[in-house]
């Protein structure tokens, strides 16, 4: 995967030739690997240069110090995250159900975080948030508001305050569980991703579908939805099941999504 062009303000100079661009890409990729292996605090520019098979002077031509390298990785991650979010939101109408959208979203990010650059930047945010210039509480609030608006698209009856509470709960919980998953080996990680999908679907489904869509009548005896009205009893609608022939009083339950 090609590495996005880092913010020019984070670099001493922009690489112009293809060879220089490739060198910067390698430095950034290797830097992420070194940060993941030994931690940001223990990592040095000399380690990064040696592993990238680059002279330390060449590294300093582009990055003044270790922090500048990290900020370049942060900028790459920010650019990619915004691109993924935009694509997901624009394609939301293509999914048959919210369940399908949630599962696809978890899969997209699971694949994305296999790359060492976003993985090390993401984990580092929870270790030393003071290092960051782009990711902060303002970004979190914008993300929560974006998700809240998205939930209201699925359920126009959802109040703004409730949608924002749902969005914040999902955002904070997802981050905590994703952080734990990224620290595990591949097999355990996949198990945790499956649990994450189940949790998000179970939590969001009752809220993000309008009541008219969410509630349907089914027969309590055979679970059939082929019903006909059959008078009233005790001021409640009575139904006759066309499949099993039994009668029952009004009973609303959630549709099987």
Image (spheres, helix red, strand yellow):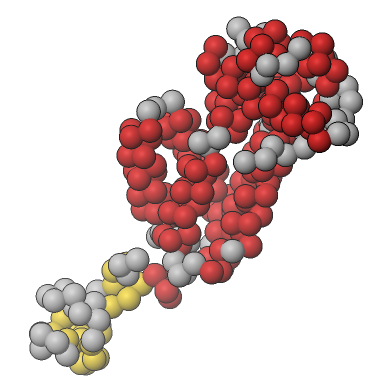
Q: Is residue 146 visible?
A: no
Q: Residue at x 68, y 46 (%)?
A: 82
Q: Residue at x 88, y 22 (%)?
A: 12
227 over 124 or under it: above or below: below
- Name the residue nearer the viewer: 223 or 56: 56
Quadrant including the N terminus: top right
Residue 79 position within the rendered picture, expressed as x and y whole percent measured from the top left: 71, 42
Q: Is residue 225 visible?
A: yes
Q: Residue at x 55, y 48 (%)?
A: 167
In the figure, is residue 205 to the left or right of 224?
right
In the figure, is residue 7 to the left or right of 214?
right
233 over 3 or under it: above or below: below
- Name the residue nearer the viewer: 238 or 98: 98
- Name the residue nearer the viewer: 232 or 148: 148
Q: Residue at x 60, y 7 (%)?
A: 42
Residue 198 position within the rendered picture, expressed as x and y whole percent measured from the top left: 35, 49
- How many marks the image carries: the answer is 0
In the figure, is residue 220 to the left or right of 173?
left
Quadrant including the C terminus: bottom left
Q: Quadrant of residue 123?
A: top right
Residue 225 position within the rendered picture, expressed as x and y whole percent measured from the top left: 25, 81
Residue 204 position within the rendered picture, expressed as x and y whole percent measured from the top left: 43, 55
31 over 235 or under it: above or below: above
Q: Quadrant of residue 187?
A: top left
């Amino acid at each position: 995967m090609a590495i996005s062009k880092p913010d020019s303000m984070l670099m001493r100079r922009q690489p112009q030739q293809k060879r220089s661009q490739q060198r910067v890409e390698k430095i950034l990729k290797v830097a992420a690997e070194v940060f993941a292996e030994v931690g940001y605090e223990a990592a040095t520019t000399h380690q990064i240069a040696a592993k990238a098979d680059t002279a330390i002077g060449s590294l300093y031509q582009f990055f003044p110090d270790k922090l500048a390298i990290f900020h370049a990785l942060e900028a790459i991650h920010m650019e990619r995250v915004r691109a993924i979010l935009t694509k997901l939101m624009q394609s939301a109408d293509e999914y048959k159900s919210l369940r399908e959208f949630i599962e696809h979203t978890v899969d997209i990010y699971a694949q994305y975080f296999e790359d060492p650059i976003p993985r090390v930047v993401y984990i580092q945010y929870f270790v030393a948030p003071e290092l960051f210039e782009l990711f902060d509480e303002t970004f979190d609030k914008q993300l929560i508001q974006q998700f809240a608006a998205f939930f209201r698209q699925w359920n126009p009856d959802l109040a703004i305050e409730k949608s924002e509470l749902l969005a914040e709960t999902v955002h904070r919980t997802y981050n905590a569980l994703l952080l734990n998953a990224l620290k595990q080996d591949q097999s355990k990680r996949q198990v945790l991703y499956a649990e994450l999908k189940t949790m998000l679907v179970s939590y969001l489904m009752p809220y993000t579908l309008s009541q008219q869509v969410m509630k349907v009548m089914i027969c309590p005896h055979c679970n059939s939805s082929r019903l006909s009205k059959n008078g009233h009893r005790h001021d409640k609608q009575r139904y006759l099941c066309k499949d099993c022939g039994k009668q029952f009083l009004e009973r609303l339950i959630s549709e099987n999504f």
